[in-house]
Image (cartoon, grey):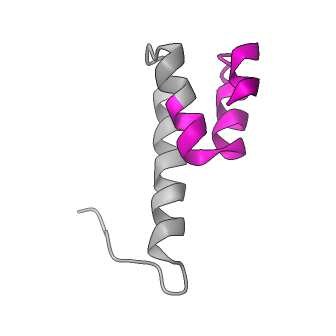
Amino acid sequence: MKDDRPIPGVSRQQRLVEEGLQRLHKQLSGGAAMTDPVLAQWIRRYGDAARDIIRQANRYRDEFDDI
């Protein structure tokens, strides 16, 4: 059974960011076929943390620097 209780002292916003970035990492490491516009949306939403994950997956494009 999954324990979805909030972690004390961690804001809801921060928890959602962490979960989103974990989801991005899992999808890219699992070989998900994300298009460049979808990856750009992740960068818009999560910023440099998403850039780092996308770089680690060797999916980063120079065009993402303009975002």
Q: Give the range drawn in magenta.
A: 41-67
Residue 66: horizontal and vertical position, in percent? 73, 26
Q: Quadrant of the N terminus?
A: bottom left
User: Residue lying farthest left?
Assistant: 1
Residue 40: horizontal and vertical position, in percent? 56, 27
Residue 32: within the magenta? no
Is residue 29 in view? no
Is residue 44 in view? yes
User: Residue lying farthest bottom?
Assistant: 8
Q: Nearer the viewer, residue 48 or 1?
A: 48
Q: Which residue is drawn at 57% across and 39% down?
A: 44
Q: Residue at x 47, y 54 (%)?
A: 19
Q: Residue at x 50, y 32 (%)?
A: 41
Residue 67: horizontal and vertical position, in percent? 67, 31
Q: Nearer the viewer, residue 46 or 4?
A: 46
- Residue 43 falls in which quadrant of the image? top right
Residue 9: horizontal and vertical position, in percent? 55, 86
Q: Is residue 8 above or below residue 67?
A: below
Majority secondary structure in the magenta region:
helix
> Number of numbered discs present?
0
Classify residue 31 as left or right of residue 65. left
